[in-house]
Image (cartoon, helix red, strand yellow):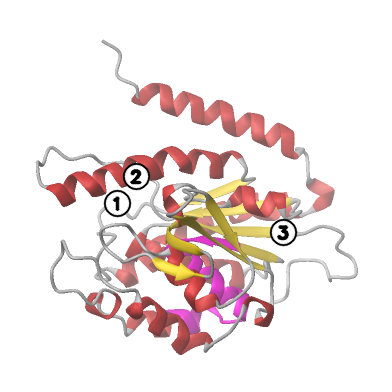
Amino acid sequence: MKNFMKSEKQKKYKIGLAFGGGGARGFAHLGVLKAFEENGIVFDEVAGTSVGSIVASLYAFGLSSDEMMTAARKLKTNDIRNSKLFFVPSKTEGIEKLVKSLIGDAHFEDMKKPLTVVAVDLKTTQEVHITQGSVVKAVAGSCAVPGVFNPVDFGEYRLVDGGLQNTIPADVLRQNGCKYVISIDVNPTRAYGTDSTKLMDILFASIRIMMKTNAVKGKLYSDIVIETDTSKFKSTSVEGGEEMYKVGYESAMKLMPKIKELLNPKEQKFSFWNIFKRNKKKILKEQEKEIIHE
């Protein structure tokens, strides 16, 4: 496929791709990447949160969507989480083994494209943007969902899932100088609640509420958000991976004309500020519908 984008010499701006969190629903990320590849769309910089950090790291390393999907097809749920007891946090060895099998002991400076992995430091409660050191360890920390995985020690930080503060890291790419940012939200219906009294059900419902709230920021900073409806699939199981991949591909293809229009400077009609205001207005309307007034 011919590259849709201008050459590096012609292009005077950066295009960023933000990969959102969503557990096993990250299969949809691979379908989106396949659509980009078929249309010759290449990104200059990437950022990822949670499972999005896994895919972002593989993309930044230079792997194709087919190579990623080949590895993903071999996955079993138990390969990722090694604790047999659901209420006992697991080590992140499964995640580390997966990423290491594809990129080895790569560090951020080994990436072919700039990569930012987003996590949260449990000690300071601050959001951490990781751009140096071990990619495998950084990704493991970004995926360390509290209650599911143990925190990951990374230098001075004790990392947990970046989705607790930044589910869709589009703002990171803006801060890094990207003129255009496209984001992938593989979990747009994340905030389903629970009436269960079980501790773990309450914990996960609370996490979903937090992730839904902070996903708003990512959408505000995005020019286009590709939302993949993976609501019928569990975020904790790899079953349905092929179908999620297809959903991701089809979701991206539907928006491809709009994406190409955005990335063609001659047809660019909106400034980032106008896009920010448009997104804010849309999101506020959506939030208003969800508020219960009594």
Q: Which region of the structure is painted magenta?
A: 47-69
Q: Position of residue 106 (x, y in %)?
A: 58, 84
Specify the farthest residue to the right.
Answer: 9
Location of residue 28 (image quadrant): bottom left
Q: Are marks 2 and 3 in contact (CB under 8 Å)?
A: no
Q: Quadrant of the C terminus?
A: top left
Task: Look at mark 1 in the image and give the residue it sits on.
Answer: 231
Q: Position of residue 13 (x, y in %)?
A: 82, 57
Q: Separation of disc 2 and disc 3 at Cα?
A: 27 Å
Q: Position of residue 182 (x, y in %)?
A: 61, 53
Task: Look at mark 3 in the image and give the residue it sits on.
Answer: 15
Amino acid at dot 2: Thr
Q: Position of residue 160 (x, y in %)?
A: 41, 59
For image coordinates 49% across by 84% down, the residue present is: 67
First along the sequence among labels 1 and 3: 3
Asked if residue 5 shows in the view, the reply is yes
Q: Which mark identifies residue 172?
A: none
First along the sequence among labels 2 and 3: 3
Amino acid at dot 3: Ile
Amino acid at dot 1: Ser
- What element does badge 3 sit on? strand
